[in-house]
């Protein structure tokens, strides 16, 4: 990839953290928690789904081996994200989504070898997981106060 494209991908990826961080901070200050938690969970599921889509695109460009098996597996982030938001209690969904981001990071780094991607992806994932844990703590604290 060209250096300019890598820079753009980095900037957009870091900018993608804004909803995670803003919703977490507002939730921690008890601003419309139910509404913001719902928005956070949906955004999280969408971004997790996007990460699976990266592999779909690489398969379409014939950049990954075993494409049939990988096409099936790269649907996992979308399905996990959807199931977490649709069927799980919010506190459980937060933990499932956080774990899914970490598991997919591991999968990503085993199959995608571009060093720029790893340097970008690792810290961003840790911030994303951290925001899930912030929400979990906020919700657990609120539940204890009741």
Image (cartoon, rainbow, N blue to C red):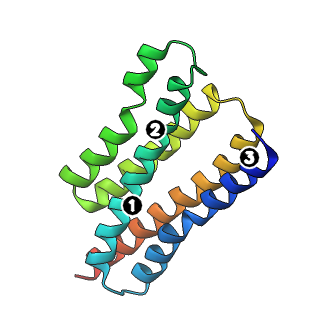
Q: Secondary structure at mark 3?
A: helix
Number of the front mark, 1 or 2: 2
Q: Residue furthest right?
A: 3
Q: In the image, what residue occupies the spot 27% across and 77% down?
A: 35
Q: Point out residue 118 in the picture as x, y percentages from the top left corner.
A: 70, 41
Report the residue marked by disc 3: 119
Q: Earlier in the sequence, mark 3 or mark 1?
A: 1
**Vertical order, 79 against 64 (above or below):** below
Q: Is residue 95 above or below residue 59?
A: below
Q: Secondary structure at mark 1?
A: helix
Where is residue 16? Give x, y as percent. Answer: 55, 62
Return the residue nearer the eye: 90 or 22.
Answer: 22
Could you give the CA–CA distance between mark 2 and mark 3, rounded to whole angstroms? Answer: 19 Å
Image quadrant holding the N terminus, namely top right
Of label 1 and label 2, which has the lower sequence position? 1
Taking depth in this image into account, of 121 and 16 the one nearest to the observer is: 16
State the residue position of label 1. Answer: 43
Q: Which mark is residue 53?
A: 2
In percent of the image, x 48 and y 67: which residue is there? 20
Few, some or many C-alpha atoms within 10 Å of disc 1 (few <14, some 14-19, many ≥20)? some
What's the residue at 20%, 52% (across, down)?
86
The picture places residue 99, in percent across and down from the top left corner, at: 44, 45
């Amino acid at each position: 990839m060209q250096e300019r494209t890598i820079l753009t991908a980095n900037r957009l990826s870091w900018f993608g953290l804004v909803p995670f961080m803003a919703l977490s901070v507002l939730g921690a200050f008890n601003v419309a928690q139910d509404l913001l938690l719902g928005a956070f969970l949906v955004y999280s599921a969408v971004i997790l789904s996007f990460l699976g889509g990266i592999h779909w695109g690489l398969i379409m460009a014939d950049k990954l081996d075993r494409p049939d098996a990988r096409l099936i597996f790269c649907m996992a982030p979308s399905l996990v994200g959807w199931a977490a938001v649709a069927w799980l209690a919010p506190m459980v969904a937060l933990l499932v989504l956080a774990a899914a981001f970490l598991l997919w990071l591991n999968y990503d780094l085993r199959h995608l070898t571009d060093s720029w991607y790893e340097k970008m992806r690792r810290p961003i994932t840790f911030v994303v997981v951290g925001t899930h844990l912030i929400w979990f703590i906020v919700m657990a604290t609120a539940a204890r106060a009741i």
